[in-house]
Image (cartoon, grey):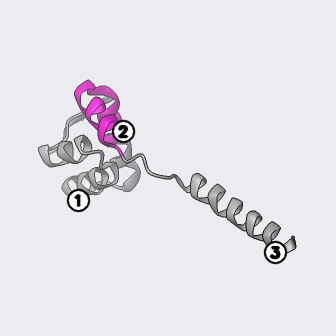
Amino acid sequence: MTVRTEDKVTVSEAVLNEIKQGKKIQAIKLFRSENGVGLKEAKEAVDAYIKNDTEAKEAFDANKPSGLSQEGILRFTIMVVVLFAIYLWV
């Protein structure tokens, strides 16, 4: 069970494990299913927990995915299309 008082949030061990593995979306899904809250409330609770718990924040930051963002993929795609167009033009 999760208890929330002001900005202090307590999460289950399962949610905490997801956070520590850098799996924020999974942590939010699990928090929602455990507590029967909406997406917004679950996201706010997980974000608040990460923000207020130093150990969880350090573990989350160390393990969060650092792959390409959507913006990075879009820029790469545009670059490839432009280079291909230049190749065809020349």
Q: Does 73 lie within the magenta span?
A: no
Give the numbered dot on residue 88: 3
Q: Residue at x 30, y 41 (%)?
A: 63
Q: From what the image shows, is residue 15 above or below residue 53? A: below
Find the magenta span and give its range.
46-64
Question: How far apart are the alpha carbons under marks 2 and 3?
Answer: 48 Å
Report which quarter residue 11 is drawn in.
Answer: top left
Q: Which residue is mark 1?
A: 33
Instruction: Check the image and name the residue furthest to the bottom.
Output: 88
Nearer the observer: mark 2 or 1; the answer is 2
Magenta part mainly helix, strand or loop?
helix
Pointer 2 local density, CA inside 10 Å: few below 14, some 14–19, many at least 20:
some
Q: Residue at x 23, y 55 (%)?
A: 30
Nearer the observer: mark 2 or 3; the answer is 3
Question: How far apart are the alpha carbons under marks 2 and 1?
Answer: 17 Å
Pointer 3 local density, CA inside 10 Å: few below 14, some 14–19, many at least 20:
few
- Which quarter shows the N terminus? top left
Amino acid, disc 1: Ser
* Element on which disc 3 rests: helix
* Element on which disc 2 rests: helix
Residue 71: percent from left, percent from top: 60, 53
Give the numbered dot on residue 47: 2
